[in-house]
Image (spheres, rainbow, N blue to C red):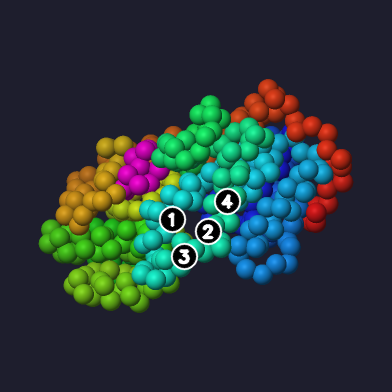
Amino acid sequence: MHVALVHMRSARVGGTESYLNQVARHLCEHGHDVTVICRSHEDAPHPKVRFVVLRALVPGSALRILAFARDVERHVRDHAYDLVVGLGRTWSQDVLRVSGGCHATYLERAHESSSKGWARWLDALSPKHRVILAIEAKALTADSLRCAIVNSELVRRDVLQRYAIDPERVRLIRNGVDLARFHPRHREEGGKRLRKELGIPEGPVVLFLGSNYGRKGLAVVLEAFPELLREFPSARLLVVGADPDIAGWKRRARELGVEASTIFLGKRSDTEACYGASDVYVLPTRYDSFAYTVLEALASGVPAVVSDAAGAAEIVESSCGAVLPAAAGPAEIAAALRTWAAPVRRESAAIASRRVAEANGAEAAAERTVALFEELVRTRGARGSPAASRASASPTSP
């Protein structure tokens, strides 16, 4: 097959970017041709991957998104791909991966947590959000759409509720984790070094990792921590990830009396060591279509306390963590953290966590994805005979 993978950005980091790299690499390793259509890219995930860069010079994020979608429409019409797979905000694909869930749901359940007052009202009128909503609706209702891939039942239900799409065309393929990169061995390697560097005592370490602390639920974690400290006085909370108001979050920790027990590390590239330094992972998110970090924690042998507003909650078993309602308060969060931070649970929880992660590895997820692509081409044929031949596509330009 000659498969085109479409996403505005091809990079080494990011949830959708990781998926793109995994699938592109797996396709190439199995003899297929891969072209990544994007606005920008870093190193290719495999030597055989070709790039087509569509980069219209237009101002503003809304116009950039719209211009890219229109450029993709023209490009795939004039070039011979057996299958076009969209990973985001375009409408000219055979397969659409709804990786972030429906955008309206994101705005309703998550985006409001990072905006306040008049800013939230202005965000609702944002041209960018209006463009994204329009593109999503056009993509999911297109007659040419063969299949929509969702990464959780949470997203499947949302898609079917919001759009008149045949349920048979919505296929569930959950995210897969890099089982070599995220591994329990980091507890004895980078994890110990990080704890020593930070001066962390022997008490339990709770890890909160994610960008946009408000959406991910840091407020309720901070409010729950005083109760955890009553049982484990030497416990520590590691807060990792980017947020535009870290100073404000530090003030909140000080107001709650947990400043000395909370360590804000900001954005880190050594997330493996962060998992290795922790005993339990917590993510009471308001909304995540999946939440890769839950799977990364489990692969690292770290049990997870997560809200049911994350798609990854669907794989968390009672032997490796707890799933709480999205509206859970500090008392419920603290009770779950007490349970999973207890030393007596660590060994069995680490084994169970790794077992669940191994059933959700990146390689297996990529295999299921490629098998679906092959099925679509085999049973319904390629896209047809467009005006230009496959060979006419330039490696670096439209």
Residue 18, magenta (yes or no): no
Marks 2 and 3 in Cβ contact (< 8 Å):
yes
Q: Which mark is residue 123?
A: 3
Inspect the image, locate mark 4, and give the three-letter code of the amino acid beneath it: Ala
Q: In the rendered image, which residue does mark 4 sit on?
A: 134
For label 3, the SS is helix
For the magenta stretch, what is the residue range?
Answer: 306-316
Any part of residue 328 in sight: yes
User: Earlier along the polypeptide chain: callout 2 or callout 3?
Assistant: 3
User: Earlier along the polypeptide chain: callout 4 or callout 3?
Assistant: 3
Residue 272 screen position, x and y as percent:
44, 56
Whether 311 is drawn above or below 286: the answer is above
Q: In the rendered image, which residue does mark 2 sit on?
A: 129
User: Earlier along the polypeptide chain: callout 2 or callout 1?
Assistant: 1
Q: Which mark is residue 160?
A: none
Q: CA distance from mark 2 to mark 3?
A: 8 Å
For label 4, the SS is helix
For label 1, the SS is helix
Whether 165 is drawn above or below 333: the answer is above
Residue 30 screen position, x and y as percent:
69, 34
